[in-house]
Image (tube, grey):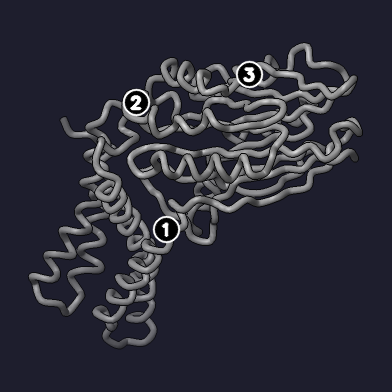
Amino acid sequence: MFNPFMLVPCLICLYDILSMIFPLRFSWPLKILLILLIISGPAKMLLMRMTPSGFTIPELTRNIALILSAMFSFMIVAAILLIMKDIVQVFWRLFLHAKFPAHFASLAVLIIAAISTVYGVYQGTRVPEVVAHDVKIPGLAKSFDGLRVAMIVDIHVGSVNRRPFVESVVESVNALSPDVILIPGDFVDGRVKDRKYDLEPLKDLRAKFGVFAVTGNHEYYYDLHGWLETLTGFGIKFLHNEHAVISSGDSKLVIAGSLDPTSRNHDTERALENVPANVPVILMDHQPKFANNNAKLGVSLQVSGHTHGGQIPVVYQITRKLNGGFVRGWYDIDGMKLYVSPGTSQWDGFPMRLFDPSEISLFTLHAE
């Protein structure tokens, strides 16, 4: 049965072929080879739509999955550049009244798109560096001053990101000697039976006060209950519209978590019910778009992911509009601090980053 979702990548593919490949002065065998490579982009999307969730590549070898994902990324980047090329072509003919050098312009797009894709996919799939943040929290007890909170988010373990990647991330996090570890969602793209082995290194995460998490939207595309059982078995404490209180002597700090709205039960107010008075609250909310409302509830610090930092410049603007204006980095909202992580990795569907490095976040809390 035809799926309308496939129409968009097919049209983008056709546009790439007509605007980039046809104007090239290459031999037809070479043009056909390039066309076949570009067609592999929407072909990958078709394979994804054949899976139960529609959000992951089938169980292919990592290299094949990575090549297919890279070709889809190339198709998108090329289309963005081709739009710019075609706009220039219109003005060229209107104002210069000269023949547009279509071959050289198309060749430039091909080369720039290829280089950008190779670099972007490398950036999107490498093990991220640690980025340190000092955070002042009003009302933080002196005994918690200097508390080290590590955060990983949007791990997206799937056909591309596998066990070696997770092992490296866990090693980097543990080397920070964190007091608390937060994981605000999007652990996985795939079924428990296929991806449990790859996520298993998460059981080696170590933190003085524990490892806390909330669900992301991608958890709901697969076996949610199976994954919650598996990840809980790895020693991860999920906060489903609830909170936990960590103590140091008589001092307290609240770690709260809201369910992702994909659950249709996102409820920060419920997560904060019966929170001790005058105790700072750190809230995990996978999607940052609820920050304005969360700020009114007395949250001190909200940490989110979901946006992947925008990934590439044009997509950044679209992501911004879809997430209440919050994409990456620090925001101050009515006294609440919001940090939107660019993510620890990428979804298999579009695994590239340009000017948007991934990170493992380390927050050192200080009393204000």
Q: Nearer the viewer, residue 9 or 112?
A: 112
Q: What is the crowding at mark 1: few (fewer than 14 residues within 10 Å), some, or many (at least 20)?
A: some
Q: CA distance from mark 3 to mark 2?
A: 27 Å
- Residue on which disc 2 sits: 191
Q: Is residue 135 left or right of residue 96?
A: right
Q: Position of residue 53 (x, y in %)?
A: 32, 28
Task: Give the residue type at disc 1.
Answer: Tyr
Above or below: residue 149 compared with residue 253 = below
Residue at screen point 17% across, 79% down: 25
In this view, 258 is above or below 170: above
Give the Cα separation between the discs numbered 3 and 1.
37 Å
Kind of element beneath mark 2? loop
- Name the residue rendered at 82%, 38% in the picture: 335
The type of residue carrying mark 2 is Arg
Q: Residues within 10 Å of mark 3 (few under 14, many from 20)?
A: some
Q: Position of residue 303 (x, y in %)?
A: 66, 36
Residue 152's disc is none
Task: For the C terminus, give its image quadrant.
Answer: top right
* Amino acid type for the residue under numbered disc 3: Asp
